[in-house]
Amino acid sequence: MIPASFEYHRPRTLKEAIGLLEAHGEDARPLAGGHSLIPMMKLRLAKPGHLVDLQDLAELRSIRSDGGSLVLGALVTQHEMIHSELLTAKCPIIRETSLLIADPQVRYCGTLGGNVANGDPGNDMPALMMTLGATYRLTGARGERDVPARDFYQGIYATALKAGEILTAVHIPTPPDRHGYAYEKQKRKVGDYATAAAAVILSLSGGTCSAAAISLTNVADTPLFARDAGDALVGSRLDDAAIAEAARRAQRIARPASDGRGPADFRKHVAGIMVRRAIARAKQRAG
Amino acid sequence: MSADGDTAQARTQKLEGLGTRRKRVEDARFTQGKGNYVDDLKLPGMLFGDFVRSPYGHARVKSINKDAALKLPGVKAVLTANDLKPLKLHYMPTLAGDVQAVLADEKVLFQGQEVAFVVAEDRYIAADAVDLIEVEYEELPALRDPNKSMTADAPVLRDDLKGKTSGAHGPRKHDNHIFTWEVGDADATDKALRAAEVVAKELIVYQRVHPCPLETCGCVASMDKINGHLTVWGTFQAPHAVRTVASLISGIPEHKIRIISPDIGGGFGNKVGVYPGYICSIVASIVLGVPVKWIEDRMENLQATAFARDYHMTGEIAATRDGRITGLRCHVLADHGAFDACADPTKYPAGFFSICTGSYDIPAAHVTVEGVYTNKAPGGVAYRCSFRVTEASYFIERMIDVLARKLKMDPAELRRKNFIRKEQFPYTSALGWEYDSGDYVTALDKAMQAVGYKELREEQRRNRDAFARGETRKLMGIGVSFFTEIVGAGPIKNCDILGLGMFDSCEIRVHPTGSAIARLGTISQGQAHATTFAQILATEIGIPASNITVEEGDTDTAPYGLGTYGSRSTPVAGAATAMAGRKIRAKAQMIAAYLLEVHDDDLEWDIDRFRVKGAPERFKTMAELAFAAYNKVPPGMEPGLEAVSYYDPPNMTYPFGAYICVVDIDIDTGVTQVRRFYALDDCGTRINPMIIEGQVHGGLTEALAIAMGQEMDYDELGNLRNASLLDFFLPTAVETPTWETDYTTTPSPHHPIGAKGVGESPNVGGVSAISNAVNDAFAHLGLTHMQMPHDHWRVWKTAERLKLTGS
Amino acid sequence: MAKMHLKFTVNGRAVETLAEPRMLLIHVLREQLAITGPHIGCDTSHCGACTVDMNGKSVKSCTVFAAQANGAEIVTIEGLAAPDGTLHALQEAFREHHGLQCGFCTPGMITRAYRLLQENPKPTDAEIRVGISGNLCRCTGYQNIVKAIGAAAQRLNASKEAAA
């Protein structure tokens, strides 16, 4: 219940924040919404000697459109994403996913950056970003670099983020008009992580699927981009056989842990069901 | 119309007495953040205590190194078993005739067991100090399956009991055996089972769960060394019992101990027993001479405080081919954890489990209960169980459904066929309980009518056909539960806790200007006694409830009582309240007669006054009589208007209910939706219907949690998998359905106001209704019984076994 | 680290305190400022009993370091009634509709409902249930809480319309 001691820093600029992370290396953690980190600190599973509170970095809070992309600052909260008219109009799967994360209080504080950067396989945004083909802007002392979400996750709490880097923004290619979308999540109760979840984006052209992307949440050590599953839909009319094949291919790469949500075989089965149901809803929504 | 212009109706309304939906007096402080819970208390010089707890389920404690912790600035003391041994407090007696380690002595026996107690200036320093204490453990094989507790090669858990061939409840046949308890007629039951046309047998497991009140346990202990007086504020559902026990084990005389239960944030049986935290805080306060606060956190509460259930019940039920039950046999394996701290009345190590013949007229029955030790936390009786009644009711309600399947009979019809009939009350069951009153047929009819039972079964038939044709992937289930439970412990002749008879008490003092104060031996943890017991009194003595203060929980002022749990407050303290009220009224009647210059018998009671029979314009209100008590009493009578009642109930009470639950199960995900839940409760006279409805809503929500996902599951190493709210299932408002409540009223003939109590009924009946519904969804496909909890994966696995999942 | 000097407003009052950076906001409120309305019911940020309103958001004060709250405007249950003691419509509705029993979840629940009704002044029952899904209750089964919040919403809307 009581965290260990730490030094607290509240930089006023991004440069200052990065400088602090560089200076203290592995012993420093950035603090955004805090609703992943602080619970771990209260259990003393995390004991950073230095916390770098990012809340004053206003430049990381914007949601804007930039050419063919949507650019979201890392400190944008789930609550802000839910209430963003721009996102609701241009990329409604984000709102749908956010509403399935945690509870109202957590959503006021929890940030996009926190949800995608810490490598917790239970988080929902990573799979979503993979489906959207998003790119993460990582900023360090030596400058900026971009890493696709699909290449970012390496293992439990292990990502491509290097020491001294902060994820500062997420660039999402704006999905085409009339795209179909769905985030389907099974959980034991509000606030729980997914037993399994699937993020689907697809496009139809004259009744035939012209593009599809499918990703899975919490059925492996990392979120999974189910490339083959999406490919199974492309060129089809999203008929039962195609959907079944997509679900099968998605299940094949799922390797969930057995835990309170159920044994691995059950969770794998649910992954398939989530894929099916997400495709069905995405199909209904596609223009 | 009376002489002073107020109608009878107006006067009755003003009282806000029995039967009214009186708003709660407690709400003023709770809605403004002005409650007084233990952790709100701050005293000058107060220190904070925190525990080092065992990470292992079973291990030897080789060494404990306090040095680094003691060097941390702000740390005042670190207690271990060795510090408590000279005081003989390293073990404490439990409520079940066993002992429990206060701080681990040489061995730890469950994950989370208390090993050392740190006392520091604040909780942050205490937490840091806990981290600095080095304990060396030698891990031992953990015993987690009670079925393996008594095998030849089972590890011996209790070194302190090793070799002892008898315990508090009789002979012990193995070092991990606690007791065997038996009731009923073994021969007659055996005969009935052998001769039966149909016998159904099933293993029904009621999984280990935890009451998890939102406020955890805690206390502030303050020893005044100058006056030799100990005060302890704490989360105590039985403050007087705690005082007596504290006196017995500390040697401080009882009149020098004051126990105060302030506002309690939910009890549900979790706050009945005495925990190591209380003892350590008291010792620390005595040693250090300042107040010491201990408040556990949620994980500690789940790991180490009183769990509930963990009953493995093998049932055999015998019947004629047309559904007349002829016998019932039950063997229970009871997992008590590492110490037997089951809060049962002394003579009942399995509580009132023998109510397991339920609402049914069963001629022959036999029950055996075997209690065993495992490497889990102690407890067992908690969570609205009325002393194992939840287990008993779940057992019989599942067995009835199992029998119904076998007989291919409708489960409601099978129940109706075997009900104890109204004319049979008072009814003595085959296991020895005398049920006070009941009208089961009326209640079941009302329930079935309200939900349209016949139409629901028709809908289910259509659903099953549609499922078979592949038109739907959802299965509908209908669950019926008709429970009779036993509460109101209880008559002193057979109910005592540690030798203290389970009476209860009320003391009333009426003030000259017509208001009153009543003090009780019970203690609310949300049940609103300050609101409802004032209602009982208002009706008895004709003073508006809003003019009656009700106090509980301070042992310096409250009359001795055994506290609040097991739905006993209304049956026992409520009775005492009515009886004390009647003594007040009897004295007031004599004063009235004196003032009106008539004979006592010439007066009749009318709502809030005595009036002369045949001359109603001549009356004295209770308010007038109150004043008169202080200056105008008849010669020879003592002034004042005060009464006390210590009530020894002649019997327990037997509330009952008819619950019907409709579920829809998504076969592909295992997700169950409760479509409808109808609960009819008969708790006898209803004191405050609004409060009753609230109790039912809350109890049903607990039942939902238990039936649908709650468990305390240990792995083979003794690690508890559900030690936090991440994995311990507490439903939010989204998972909780809307509950429909209804009632019938069959008063208890032996209770002064006919009331039976209701707090625990919804947990008793709710689990069965929900579990029966889930089981019912698959019954047509050959399922006889699915163990709880009915979480997604278990339901799906059942569907898979029945070949419904296409995998 | 040495204690930090923190300044924020609580229920309209400016407060100053010294606290270690690691001190949780709930502990600062309860132990340093004697604001004991918000409660602690768990250690994994699930139960919501500690909910306060911070800078216009419902926040679980057990998951915020007091240091993060430096400069914030915080409202707790103690600040919902009017200065003259008139109870907030929610406080009255909870009493009217029996939306509490032991009272332990109540401060967090009402404080959350307060913000919920700012977000959505006319919530359906389903929306209320989602809106309070970050607040656990063991006593009421939520049913009367939902009723109370709905009733408070109606009353607040009626006053707004009357005032308009």
Image: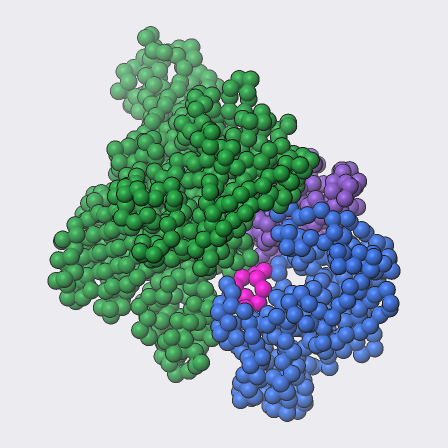
Residue ID at (87%, 67%): A142
Residue range highlighted in magenta: A187-195
Above-or-below relation of B478 to B142: below
| For residue B106, side relative to residue A152 (left or right) | left
Identify the chain drawn in green. Answer: B
Between B693 and B609, the residue placed more toward the observer is B693
| For residue C71, side relative to residue B500 (left or right) | right
Q: Position of residue B79 (x, y in %)?
A: 55, 35
Between A228 and B384, the residue placed more toward the observer is A228
Identify the chain drawn in purple. Answer: C
Q: Main secondary structure of the magenta part?
A: loop
Q: Is residue B47 visible?
A: yes
Residue ID at (73%, 81%): A176
Residue ID at (23%, 54%): B360
> Which of the colour schemes (rainbow, by chain, secondary structure, one colour) is used?
by chain
Q: Colour of chain A?
A: blue
Residue ID at (53%, 51%): B55
Q: Position of residue B147 (x, y in %)?
A: 33, 57
